[in-house]
Structures are given as C-alpha cells and as structure tokens.
Amino acid sequence: MTHPGYDLLARGGVPVVLAPMAGITNRAFRRLARENARAATDGAATGTYVTEMITSRALVERNDETMSMIATDPDESPRSVQLYGVDPATVAAAVHLLVAEDRADHVDLNFGCPVPKVTRKGGGSALPWKRGLFRAIVRDAVAASADASRAHGRDPVPVTVKMRTGVDPEHLTYLEAGRAAAEEGAAWVALHGRTASQLYGGEADWTAIARLVEELEPYGIPVLGNGDIWTHRHARRMVEETGAAGVVVGRGCLGRPWLFGQLAASFTGRDVPADPGLREVAATMRHHAELLGEVLGPVTGPRDFRKHIAWYLKGFVVRREIRQGLALASSLGEIDDLIAQMDLDQPWPGEVSEGPRGRTQPGRRVALPDRWLDDPDDLEGFLDGISAAELSVSGG
C-alpha cells in the first residue's frame, strides 16, 4: 500500500508543486501554469498548485478577502490550500471548514515563511523550534481533516507540511520536525533547503533534503525538495541527487509560467518545449494580464500585472520607456500598445534569464518573540497571548 502522499502527487500527474507566493499564486497564475503543463503533455498532467498563504484565523472568521483567496477554478484538481497559524485549535478549525465545506482536496501547513511579520509572532519558519507546538498543530490538523472527511463520507483530505531547515545554522529543526510530521500523519514533508536566517539569499542546501529523505525512509512518507529550481534541468538534478519524491517550485517560475510545461514534459518522458522567444513571451504576458482582469477585475487586474513585468522581460532588449510604461499600465489596451512597440523577433536570452528571480535578500538575524530560542519546550507567555500571535489578514 502506497503512502497517501504519493497518491496525492499522482493526482497531479507529475511530482511538481507550485509553492505558495503572496500576491503571485492567485487563480490567474495557477490557471496559466496549468495551461502550460497540459499543453506540453497533451492534457495528461498538470501538477499541484497551491493557493497563496491563508491565515487560519482569517479563514475561520470568514474574512472576505480570505474567502476569495481560497476560490479555485472548476478544473483545479487537486484543490490545494496553504494555511498559516500558530494555535492548534484555530488551525484545526480552519482545516475542518475547508474539508466540511468541500473547499479543498489538500491542505498544506506553512512552517517555512521567513518574513519578519510572521516569525516575530512565532509562526512560519520559527515555529518548528517549539517542537511540542509544532507536533500539536500537525496532529490536530490531521485529526480535523479525518473527522470532517468521515462526517461527509469522503476519504481523508491529506494534510502536508512545508518547512525550512531551521531558524539559523545553530538552531536546525528539520530532522526532528520531519519525524514529528510523519508520526502525526502528514502526507508529505516539503523542505526548503535554507534556514529562516538565509531568507532567499545564498544557495539552498540540497544535502539537507537528501538527509531528510534518508531520515524519513522508515516512515514511507514522500519528501519534496524546494530551493534553487530555476529550470527543468535543476528539478531533475534535485530529484536525482537527493532522492526526493518531487519538487516544489517557487521563485523559479516568476515570469516563466511555461516552466510548468517543461517540468511536466520532463517528468513524463516527453520532449521538453524550448524556451520561448520574446514574441511568445509577450503573448504569455498579455494572456496573464487578461486572466488577472478576469479574476481581480478590469481595473485591479492590469495594475496587479505590473509586478510581473521585470520578471517576464529579464534578459530581453526592451527600451526603458516601454518597460516603464508597462510598469504603469492600467488597462489591457495600454499593455497591447506597449507590446506592439517591442522588437519581438528576439530569441530566448539564455543563462541570463535562468538564474535567481524575485526576492534575493541576503541573510539577517531572524525576528522572533522574546526568548523564543531559550527552550524548545517552553511556551509560557506565548500561548497566553495566542490571539495576538494569529495574524488577522492573509497573504503573508
């Protein structure tokens, strides 16, 4: 009998997971990525695409923005939602809502976010240090899914864990947390090979991923690798070098949604589509902006698209005034006019467009609650103020 985590990966057709990214992995981007995967595999594979990070408390309180963020397209399968939280009861209630109301086929728990507004509350990549709390959140989330699934005559909705290697090199948590996640019923563990203190700088430690694969082998649970997957070649190399069951792709797909087509083709033994020239990139940009308009509205959509411009055009020769115009565009018409002014007969720029994208901040000291690192078993003074530690809005 295979572990449920492998069954979950099989639903996507390929062992490729889109990492949640705030302000990026909304319904428009997820649809664009799925379209590319399907086109490259004749409709045979899509992968698994996770929503932006959702705050458990905001979900339980049915915050309007949060409820819109968990919305999925009719053809999304599996429907994957990532939750953030620091209170086992609140996380469990959020999982129960998602399962009981049939809003998700997969729930991922965020223990990897390194940004200060999350870690200073004891959440994200800071939380696994408090091993009892970490274990309780995973245990209660899995139990809530099982209870709600049973009550509605469904198979248990799998709960997975995404985490980093630790707070910093002196406070590594990934091996103990991985074992705890496996023992408490997580369907898979995804490991970003960086500590919280590294943020997004430096290189991901793939040897840590390999070490976790070895550590969790007795449990039969799949381990997914995350970090520095910029091309389909990096993804295959990570699997080969670490023994990971699959890959989680984050910043490598920024401005490159066709990467999911290349990944899907690679993992299914098909010919990998070539990297596109500027004409094809411009068509994808326009389609992305159009999808954002459908999801976010004709005013907000084109404006939200602005953040993607530099990623799409990285390495191409495009006049500064055109780039600046796209960064200020507020309608599809303006985007069309500016694209028409580009020299579209440019091939893929090569390596200059294949390296780090998005956030590349160097490491720094992690913002944490007072005396957080003193004792991994001490929660005095933290749980008393748990309501303050739960963020009130989503998207972190």
Image (cartoon, rainbow, N blue to C red):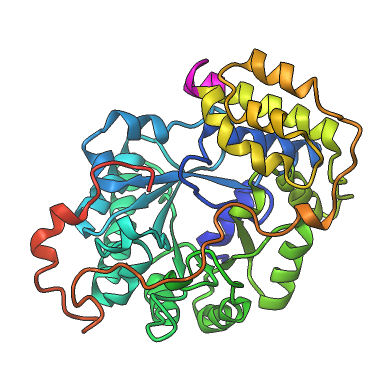
Q: Nearer the viewer, residue 161 or 103?
A: 161
Residue 23 at x, y = what percent?
47, 40
Most frequent secondary structure within the magenta stretch: helix
Q: Residue visible at 15% across and 73% down? A: 379
- Is residue 239 among the parts visible in the rendering? yes
Which residue occupies the extreme top position in the image? 333
Q: Nearer the viewer, residue 76 or 290?
A: 290
| Residue 108 picture location, percent across and down | 43, 54
Which quarter of the rendering shows the N terminus?
A: bottom right
Question: Within the magenta stretch, is there residue 299?
Answer: yes
What residue span does the magenta drawing correspond to? 293-300
Residue 368 sits in which quadrant? Answer: bottom left
Residue ID at (70%, 69%)? 239
Residue 210, quarter of the rendered image: bottom right
Task: Out of 131 and 15, give the one closest to the viewer.
Answer: 131
* For residue 46, above or below residue 217: above
Number of residue marks: 0
Left/right placement of residue 362 relative to residue 140 reads: right
Residue 159 appears left or right of 334: left
**Which is nearer the eye, 150 or 229?**
229
Q: Is residue 151 magenta?
A: no
Question: To which quarter of the image does residue 310 belong?
Answer: top right
Q: Residue furthest front?
A: 321
**Can the viewer see residue 76?**
no
Would residue 5 be found to the left or right of residue 348 on screen? left
Q: Residue at left 56%, top 25%?
A: 292
1 shown above or below 288? below
Residue 357 position within the rendered picture, expressed as x and y whole percent measured from the top left: 64, 53
Q: As displayed, is residue 392 above or below residue 235? A: above
